Structure formats: C-alpha cells, structure tokens
Image (cartoon, grey):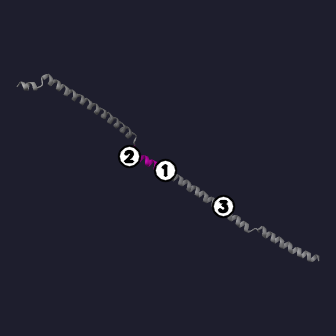
Amino acid sequence: LEDIRDSRATTGERLQYLERVFGELGDKHAREMKTLRAAHDKHSGDLDEVKALHAHHASMPERIDYLEKLLGDSADTHAQEMLALKDAHAKVAAAHGKQEEALESLRSKQAHYATLVERLDYLEQSLGGSIETHSSEVR
C-alpha cells in the first residue's frame, strides 16, 4: 500500500499539474482568440471594401437607363444631322437647276449671234468680192 501511496502524486503536485495544464490551455486559447480576432478584423475590412466598391458600381437598371439615354441622344443628333443634310442637298440641287437654266439661256442667245470666226469669214468674203470688183474696174 505504501508503494501505491508513494507512486501517487500528492495533492499539491496534482494541483500544480492541473494549474500548468490549464495555464497552457489558457495561453493556447488566448493565442487562437487573437488569431481569430485578426482574421475577423481582416474580413470586416474586406467586407467594407466590397461595400464601398458596390456603392460606386451602377446597378443594371442604371446602366440600361444610361445606354438608352446615350443612344436616344445619338439618334436625335443623327436625325437632326440627316435633316440638315437633306436641306443642304435640296439647296445645292436648286442652285444647280438655276445654273442649268442660265446656261441654256446663254446657249440660246449665243445661237442667234455669229461667232468671231464666222464674222471674219463674212467680212473677208464681202471685202474680197469688193476688192476683186474694184480692181477689175480699175484696170
């Protein structure tokens, strides 16, 4: 029996052993809690960043509204430019028509007048016949 008593730890030893084990467990628990708190703080910061990015990100309806407005403005601008081009084309066509009329008028007026070459030929014929008549009379 004494051997059993000697091999058994005393109450003080047993208490010291339990205090050491609980102390180590407490330290281990404190380290793990510190690690968990750090991870929690990091995740909390990441979540704040995601929320901030999401706040700057336009929602799908906002994006569609923007595109519709942009395309609508572009279509309106395009329609105005097309009307302006049609008006300009009509003005050019009208001016071309007036020039065509003026050219035809000049051509018709010019048809009634003899050209310079025709007039010189006429003068040469008239004078040539006179010169020949005058020289035959002088002889």
- Identify the residue at image location x=61%, y=59%: 94
Asked which secondary structure carries label 1, the reply is: helix
**Residue 65 painted magenta:** yes
The stretch in magenta equals 58-73
Residue 60 is labelled as: 2
In the drawing, does residue 27 fall left or right of residue 67? left
Q: Nearer the viewer, mark 1 or mark 2?
A: 2
**N-term mark: 1 or 2:** 2
Residue 70 coordinates in the image, percent (x, y):
46, 48
The majority secondary structure of the magenta stretch comes to helix
Of callouts 3 and 1, which one flags the residue occurring earlier in the amino acid sequence? Answer: 1
Residue of label 3? 99
Spatial distance from mark 2 to mark 3, Cα to Cα?
58 Å
Left or right of 63, for residue 28? left
User: Total of numbered circles in the picture?
Assistant: 3
- Residue on which the image places disc 1: 74
The amino acid beneath tag 2 is Met
Q: Quadrant of residue 19?
A: top left
- State which tag comes first along the sequence, 2 or 3: 2
In the picture, the quarter occupied by the C terminus is bottom right
